[in-house]
Image (spheres, helix red, strand yellow):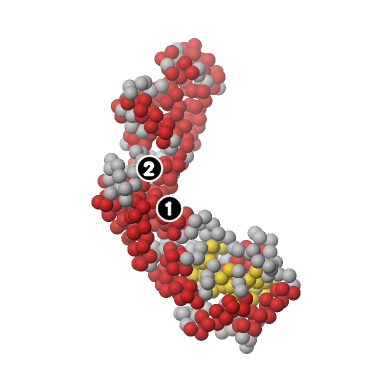
Amino acid sequence: MASALTDRLSRLVKTMRGQARITESNVQDMLREVRMALLEADVALPVVRDFIARVKDKALGQEVVASLTPGQVLVSIVQKELAATMGEGVSDINLAVQPPAVILMAGLQGAGKTTTTAKLAKYLIEKRKKKVLTVSGDVYRPAAIEQLKTVTKQAGAEWFPSTPDQKPHDIAAAAIDYARKHYFDVLLVDTAGRLAIDELLMAEIKDLHALLHPVETLFVVDAMQGQDAINTAKAFKEALPLTGVVLTKLDGDSRGGAALSVRQVTGAPIKFAGVSEKIDGLEVFDADRHAGRVLGMGDIVALVEGVTKGLDVEAAQKLAEKMRSGTDFDLNDFLAQLSQMKKMGGLAGLMDNLPAEMTAKAGKPDMDKAERDMRRMEGIINSMTPLERRKPDLLKAKRKFRIAKGAGVQVQDVNRLLNQYEQMRDMMKKMKGGGLMKMMKQMGG
Ligand code: GDP
């Protein structure tokens, strides 16, 4: 399922080669695919609609860099917009208050609140060197208090006792008092969750919020919840000023579309992702990476990114201009092409990024060797004089011997390089200044 969009888009991408601009007509089919992918990933429908409208707005009229197709450019826009929607960069836990900093955990029963409380305790102890206290306000399930006690111990934090006959308000008041007196940096407050939203539960957690003035109010939500996540998020957002979201169970096979819905509804950044049941299964949320997962198309995006980031557009244009004006393609140009390839992450990087169906056709070349060859070729050209680079015809036996010695290679290596240079020169002549991508495509068959 994860590669479905990749396949569908690459098919569309092929039909759109040679179009220089993203237009109303060529964008429709692409957007339909993106919409399908988002729905498949369980993003809520209103969120999908909004998102598609924003992407269309950004995409229309976009120029398409010569070496890319409109499809590739659109994919890149989609991915960036998706990452931006889910939050840019990473946002860590805020502890910038007079200690103890209180973190209030909110969410439905089973979302992973208790587990996440312990994971956060461990994270704050190990990564932020904090003294951490946990407390459970879940007086409805005796097992919940015991569960927090157990996992808190595993995390290496201290647990503040509570019992089912107490009121959550009183428990919280006693815990904050204890935390102050014993110089804790952080107090993590686990709360009761119900299977569905109910008034009493919301009133109770609102009361806790008013009492504790938490610096962070984290909404914990199960990534497998899919479409329902939007309703849960709405209810919690109305009750509490949420400061962040923890998306749990991302180790499951959900595509994690809930991230998009929850982020849009709450407006709060997704701060952490739960990636296992274990106490160390917590990661700082990475929106860029998650965008790829939601769309199931990390491959193509990485390729497009590699191309737009790595290519020296100016150099490519200069070369194209040179070819048009009929000047010969010399060894300087050959070297420039080599370094362009290297910038794009080398051959290995490029091949890794290609969808499997493309690389399958080309066979599996020895990438380490390809990289080594490329470096050797650079070394040889760097051992030539400027004149030799401009006029490779000068390279007869004596000069070749000198160059080979300078570069620490055999004369055969120099000959091989000159052969490759000649091949590329002939190809360039035929293409009349087409760029690197064209050449790569030809090489790929
Ligand atoms: P709470 O009712 O919100 O406190 O939820 P719990 O912390 O008790 O978690 C409910 C279930 O989900 C437990 O079985 C946890 O082990 C499991 N769980 C929580 N977070 C994760 C996660 O990130 N990955 C996986 N696989 N399981 C998780």
Image point (34%, 55%), residue name: 57
Q: Residues within 10 Å of mark 2 (few under 14, many from 20)?
A: some
> How far across and down, in percent of the image, does residue 127 sit?
65, 59
- Residue 218 position, x and y percent, is 55, 69
Q: Nearer the viewer, residue 100 or 7?
A: 100
Determine the secondary structure under disc 1: helix
Q: Which amino acid is tagged 2?
A: Thr
Q: Which residue is mark 1?
A: 80
- Of the residues shown, which amino acid type is indicated by label 1? Lys
Instruction: Give the percent coordinates (x, y) of residue 141.
Output: 56, 83
What label sits on residue 359 in the rendered view?
2
* Of residues 97 and 248, the one drawn nearer to the viewer in this rendering: 97
Picture residue at 56% right of the left edge, 63% below the top: 281
Total numbered labels:
2
Closest to the camera, between mark 1 and mark 2, is 1
The residue most toward the left is 25
Label whose residue precedes the other's in the sequence (1 or 2): 1
Relative to 350, say whether 203 is above or below: below
When asked about the image quadrant of residue 173, the answer is: bottom right
